[in-house]
Structures are given as C-alpha cells and as structure tokens.
Amino acid sequence: MTGTALRVDVVSIFPEYFAPLELSLIGRARAAGVLDLVVHDLRTWTHDVHRTVDDTPYGGGPGMVMRPEPWGAALAALAPADAPPPRLVVPSPAGTRFSQALAYELAAEPRLVFACGRYEGIDERVLADAALRMPVTEVSLGDYVLFGGEVAVIVIMEAVTRLLPGVLGNADSLAEESHAHGLLEAPVYTKPPSWRGHDVPEILRSGDHGRIARWRRDQALLRTAARRPDLIAALPPGALDKRDLATLDGAGFQVPAAGMAK
Ligand code: JQB
C-alpha cells in the first residue's frame, strides 16, 4: 500500500455487510493501492462471554442502545493517542445531510474511521468523548430511517472512492457530473440513433461542439429548474449568466437573485 492511500477503518457488528466493497470500482481502488480499507467487528472489543454490545436505555423506552465500553476500546485501538487522529464519521438519522461537498472533504482526509451503530444508536458519551481527541462528523443519508449505519457507510465510501486520484481515470467526468456544478446533468444517449420511434436529439449528431455544449447547458438548467428548484436557489452568486437566465425565463421559470450574474 502506498503512502498516499486513504486509510479507512469501519467498525460494525455486521462486518459481513461490507463484502460489496470488494467489488467493482471500490475493489479496483483497493487493488490499485489508493484505498486501504479494513473492516472490524465491534465484538472484538467486548470481554464478556456473550460479547454484549447493547443495553436498555436510561429513561426507558423501546429498543436497546449500544454500550459505550466496546466503542471506547475500539476507538482507542483505531485512534491511538500517539498518532495523528483520524476523522470519525458516524452515520445517524440525526446527522447533517451527506453531500457531494462532504464526499470531497472526506476524500481529502488521510484517515477515516466509520462507526456503524445499530438498535436505537450509540450511547451519546462515545461521540462526546471521541470529540475530545478527533473531529467527529455525524452524517445522515436522508430523511428516512434505516436499521443501522452499515448501508450509509457503503454509500459514503462509494461516493468518496470515485473521487480518489486514479480511480475514475478521467478528470473530465468528475468536473462535468451532476452536483459538481450545482445542476443536474443533461440527458445522455448512445446508439442506435432511432429506437422504438424515439430519436436521439438531432443536435447531438450534428458534430457542432459549441451548439452541443449550449444545448447540454440548457437541458441541465431546465431539468434542474423543473425537478430540483432547491438547487437553482442554492447556486452561488454569478453561477447563471445572461444566456442561462434567458433559457430559464423562456421556459417560464422565475430565477432567484442569488444565482444571477451581476
Ligand atoms: C441505528 C440508525 C441510521 C445509523 C443514516 C439514515 O438510530 C436510530 N434512531 C431511530 C430509529 C432507528 C435508528 C437506527 N439506527 C444506527 C443508525 C439509522 C444510521 C440512518 C441513517 N446515516 N436513516 N437512518 N439516513
């Protein structure tokens, strides 16, 4: 493994959940030495005969809570005090929303530790104590409830891995993709030129790269305005030029002042 590889440790009571990370691009990144990923069983850090990781919640209520002691021992092992601390990422329905911007941040770190909770979550003191020694980021995939953090870690690692240098093999595909420029992408087509009576837009077959680029920009703007008006509203000042505004205005979309060029 090279010195530039992103080192990732994942702690879970279901380490077998992470078998998919051997496949496809993530597997390739690992084989290429840009990603060094190790999955750990939280029960490694239990000491009782039943390898207990949960207990009843203080204050009552349904379900169980993950005990702090195994997590404390796991983080002591994976973030020793004599080494630069990793960034601890904890999936939680109470976290801030995962985004492409956070994926870029995580891809730029040297070391990540993911803590996968189950049941009703991890005793809050684990996060409070970890935060004394390392940056802690609680992250949510979205406003729906999962059984635990494992699937979230797979999603996050897929988003992060494709940003690692050398994984995609084409810097352009990163720069042009959805969310990189704050807009959805234009529709894409391949052969054949006509299929079941649906034709590929003539302009894409014209060879006029200037008009194609403009058409794709217009399609991106119109799709985003129709499907994700929140993304249009969140564009940084100056993201839309006069031509963009004319495209949106021509289709009847109101543009908030934020995205407008001066
Ligand atoms: C336990 C999780 C998610 C981690 C993300 C997302 O914590 C809970 N609280 C209430 C009900 C159920 C749970 C279950 N649970 C650990 C854990 C859920 C993550 C999670 C998540 N990331 N939804 N749910 N977007």
Image: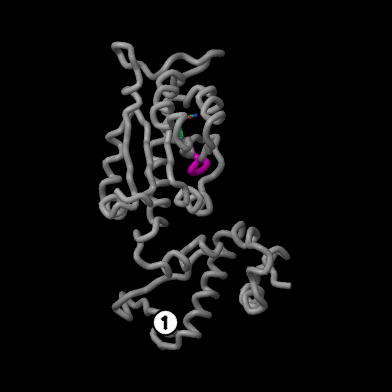
Q: Residue at x 42, y 52 (%)?
A: 159
Q: How is the image coloured?
A: one colour
**Image quadrant assignment for residue 12:** top left
Please state if 256 lies on the left or on the right of 26 as rendered. Answer: right
Give the labeled residue for mark 1.
204
24 drawn magenta: no
- Magenta part of the chain: 140-145
Q: Amino acid at mark 1?
A: Leu
Please state if 235 lies on the left or on the right of 134 as rendered. Answer: right
Q: Residue at x 48, y 62 (%)?
A: 178
Considering every residue shown, the one lying at the far top of the view is: 49
| Residue 2 position within the rendered picture, expressed as x and y whole percent measured from the top left | 32, 51
**Image quadrant assignment for residue 194:** bottom left
Please state if 220 lies on the left or on the right of 254 as rendered. Answer: left
Q: Is residue 212 above or below residue 7?
A: below
Q: Residue at x 42, y 84 (%)?
A: 202
The answer to whether any part of residue 64 appears in the image is: no
The quadrant of the picture occupied by the C terminus is: bottom right
